[in-house]
Every structure is written in structure tokens, then in C-alpha cells.
Image (cartoon, rainbow, N blue to C red):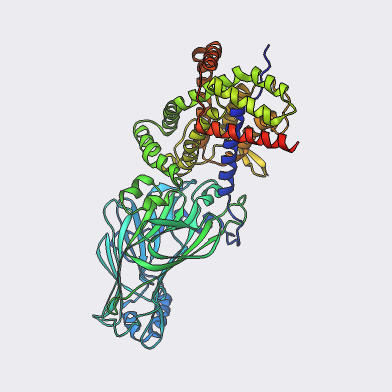
Amino acid sequence: MEEKKFDVNSLIGFLLIGAVLIWMLYNNQSETPIEDTNTTTQEEVVDEKTSENQLQNNNTSTPTSTNDSIALAQAQKQYGVFGYSAGKASAEAITTLENEVLQLKISNKGGQIVEAKLKQFKTYDSIPVYLIKNGNASFNVTFKTSDNRTISTEDMVFEPKLIDNQTLSMKLKVSENDYLEFYYALKPNDYMFDFDIKSQGLSSVVQNKDVTLDWKIKTYRHAKSISYENRYTEILWEYEGGSDDYSGQGSLEEDSDQDITWVAFKQHFFTSILLTDQAFSEGKFISKNLVDDEDIDTVYTKDFTATLPLALKAGEFNESLDFYYGPSDYKILNEYDRNLDEVIPLGWGIFGWINKYLIIPFYNVLSGFLPAGIAIIFLTIAIKILLSPVQYKQYVSQAKMKVLRPEIEEINEKHKDNAMKRQQETMKLYNKAGASPMSGCIPSLLQIPVFYALFNFFPSAFDIRQKSFLWADDLSSYDVIAELPFTIPFYGDHVSLFPILASIAIFIYMMMTTGQNMQPSQPGMPNMKFIMYISPLFMLFFFNNYASGLSLYYFTSNLITIGIMLVIKNFIIDENKVLAKIEQNKKKPRKQNRFAKKMQEMMEEAEKQKKAKK
């Protein structure tokens, strides 16, 4: 029985895939958090029963206590000319705006949104998705008056005027005709709405300098896996007409850029975005990681701050802005044609192109008439068919190398004391036979862009959020077949089945590729048995907390690869025919390519120099 030995092409391929996995693991690790502010539970912060009882109908304002009203009025009167509104606003009030997908509650204290609810979505524990609630966010415009007083709008009382259930004017008045206005206008069935900051008659009251807008959000946890959600929770912004930057996944002390066109506080599958028609001259951004221990239940994940300057025009406010409170869905964000699709981390360069122009459109077609899990399987089949010519070339190269192995071993034995001569003779053999070890490596390289593109696609695919398949309740999160009473480092406190199946499939594939009875590792070469065992284990640990949809893809992909390899080996590639073709190639005069010729000349020159030294 022929003794199977390791194949250099497979080794290179596995090493490349392992290197990519290690690189992705390194780039997806959260930095060490710098503070922990999560001492309460989500139930304490978002009590669904209480919140539903407090929901107001459209076109309503809810007064608070008289003491609060008096305190607000007294606080406002100390600001001189801006005390006019205090007499008009008898109490703090909440005004509700809503359309089919979004509900906003706006307080006359600060004229800011105090609650933003996405009406069509639930969290992992069936609570409505709130991006703003219970004081986790603030929006504040700060400026100085002509008498050098500092005004913060979040401390001031605005007068609300509800135009209809989707349009609201909030005015901070100096007099009956002079005011600062926050104007909100929702659109039907849209997550984006207009927000204007305008003023009238304030040119003599407000100093035309140091006018800033501060926007802050402490992001709620919405997903089952704290670490997984936090990995994709980050602050992003677009600057200098088309480029985008981001804070990373850990903490950011402070970063800044110029010509800011939008800022996004991304919470994995949900996003809050502030956009401007005319770019802010600059912006400063801070991100704080609030997750101290990923194994302990938490309410908040990150704390984001954006500070942006406002430029007065002829001494007056005149800013046309937009807010987006909605899902991090590529289809929705891409329709706005404002580069908001850059919020979705689809990968840079060719990886992003593959996702945008190949994987996402095709998956959208499949998911239009198939369940999410079945759509992933069909997507996998289509990708394997697309890559089958590349894989066929790889298998042909492996077959050629296998047929040439006896001659290569003969050369190694003949020139075992002369590495240079051994290399020269081996290259001559490859050239005569029309074979090359690189021809098996190149197909592996061609598959890596698709591999990495899919690695970015599944964690960001909003369409698989809360979609079930077999035992997986949510394909956008990990599947669970058993809860552990303890936590295993790098693995977690649960057992996911799809990563186990994917690891087994990879192990079987590697067994078929490298062989069960391999010779001892050669000097300078890694132990193939070690690689064969460590790769599936690496995937098992790496994917246990990742989206089960991603593990489903790799499991299906490896099963198909095994099937394709068996078909090619048993029905398509005949090793005797390969050998016969190689023998024919040896008889034909074959011109070396430039690279091979150059390598041959370099080795011959090195051999001459070696002999000259002796």
C-alpha cells in the first residue's frame, strides 16, 4: 500500500488560511476596557411594562411636577434675555412624533430627543429596541451671549409647537419674535428625519465664536452575546468628501478630523447617525468601552461623544441637519446615496467589492423566497460552483506533484549533501514536466478574498438577525446546544454545535488531503499532524461565539469541498493519464519562463561562486 505523504501545496494553503484567521482574530479583539459603569441590570433601566404604560398618544404633551417647572423657570431666568421662555413654559412637557417605523419623544427641556424607539424590532429578550431612553443620550448646543454668559440649550426650556404628528417646532425665545429654534420633521415610513437649527433676531445677542454642538449616546446592549455585539459597536465618521474613519472596537481617548459630513454611533445592528448638508469644519470624537467583564450581564456597551463646531451666518443659526435612528441594514443605508453604507464593515478593497457587488445582491435574491438558513446553504453552493475551476486546477497540481514525488525523492537522495544542486535539479524536473508547486498555491490565494469577504458579511448581515434555522434561534448570534456551569477561556460558557460540525468537516478534509499515515516531518518543515489537529481546534474555539450563520457556511462549504474532491479524484483525474502527459511533456522542448530562467541563472552563479571559494 502506498504511503501517503504531506503535500506542500496543501501545507501552504492551510498556513495561509491559518494566518488569515489569526489576523482576523487579532483585528477583532476588543481592547482592554478603561471603566465599568454597568452596575445595574437592563430590567432596572428598561422596564417594558412601565414604559408601555407611559407611552403617549400622538399630539400630546405630558407635564411634570410643579416643583420641576419652578426649578426650570428659575434656572432659565438667570440667563437674562433667555428668561423670556420661562414664563411661557408652565411645565416640562414631552411631545411625541412618530411614523410607521419610528417613535420619538422630545422634551421641552433642552428641546432634545429623550426617547427613540424602533417600532418594528425587538432585542434578544423581546424588549422593544430603544436607541435613546432613560437619559442615556444628550444633544446640547453651547454658545456665549454678548454679555459673555455661556448658554447650554440642554438646560433651557423651549416652547413646543406641534404642527402635525410628524412635525414639531421647539423655540427658545428671547422675545415674541426673536428665538432659537429646533425643528423636527419626520417622513412617512423613514428612519431618517430632518433636524434644523435656526434663529431669528439673535445676531446682537450671540457671539459669533465658540459655538459648539455636543452629541452623546451611551449605547444599550441589544444582543445575546455581549462580546460579539461590543466588537461591532463603534463610532464612525466621514470626512474630506468620501473617506471614512472609525474609533476601533476599544476605547478612544480623542480623535479628530476636518470637513465632517456625518457621524455614526453604531451599535452593531442598529445605528444613530447625524448628517449635515454642509460639512462641519472639524470634529472631535471620544469612545469609552463600558464592558468591564463580558461574562457579567450588562446594560451599556460603549459611551460615544461627538463635538462639532457650528458656524453662524450673519450672526444667526442656520444649520440643515438630518438624524437617522434605525437598523444597520446595508440595503436601507445604501438607498440614501450618502455613503452611509460605509457604516457596515464589509471589508476594505477587494473584500468590500466582493460583498457589495456579488455576495449581498445574490443573497438578497435568495432570501427573497427562501428561509435564511436555506438561503445561506444555496449561497454556499453557488460560491463553490463559482470557485470550482480554481479548485480543479489546485487538485490537478496536487496530482502532478504526487506523480513526480518518486523522482523528487530520488533527486533529494542523490544530492542530499548539496542543497543548491538539489534545488537546481528539482526545478529542471518541474520545468520539463510542466508542473510547479506554485500552481497549487495560487488557487489557495485566489480563494482567500472570498473567504475574508464572507467573514465580514455574516456578522453584518441584518437580514439574518433573529432568523432561526434548525436548532439555531438566531443566525446572527451563536447557537447553543448546552450551557456550561463555568467559563472556558477563549471558548465561553456554552457549546455551539455548528462550529463543532465545521471543525469536524475541516478535519476530514485535511485527513483526505494530507493522508493518515504521513512520514516524519522533514527538517525545516512543520509537523503536518500538528497542523491537521490544531486547525479544527482553532476554528472550534474561534467560532464558538461568532454568528451561527458563519459557522453554517463553513460547515456546508467544507462538506461540498469534500464531495468535489472525491468526485475529481475518483471520476475526473486519472493519475495514469497525468503521468503519461508528464512523460510527453518531458520529451518536448520546453522554454523556461522568465522567472524560472532567472532563478536558474542565479543558482548556477551561486554554484560557481561556491566552487571558486573552494
Q: Residue 153: which quarter of the image? A: bottom left
Q: Does the rendering let one see residue 391? A: yes
Asked if residue 194 is positioned above or below residue 78 in the image, the reply reads: above
Judging depth in this view, the residue of 406 and 177 nearest the camera is: 406
Which residue is at the front of the view, 448 or 363?
448
Residue 504 image-quadrant placement: top right
**Camera-nearest residue between 99 and 350:** 350
Q: Please, which residue is most extreme toward the bottom here? A: 147
Q: Residue furthest front?
A: 612
- Location of the C terminus by quadrant is top right
Q: Is residue 263 visible?
A: no
Q: Quadrant of residue 495?
A: top right
- 364 on left or right of 397: left
The correct choice, above or below, for 586 with respect to 339 in the image is above
Q: Quadrant of the N terminus?
A: top right
Percent coordinates x, y for residue 510 in the rendering: 61, 26
Residue 34: x and y in percent read 61, 61
Q: Along the line of sight, which residue is nearer the eye, 483 or 344?
A: 344
In the image, residue 26 lies at what x, y percent?
A: 59, 47
Q: Is residue 419 left or right of residue 231?
A: right
Residue at figure coordinates x 49%, y 14% from the top left: 572
Q: Is residue 506 above or below residue 127?
A: above
Give the image location of residue 57, x and y in percent.
31, 58
Placement of 364 over or under 411, stated as above or below = below
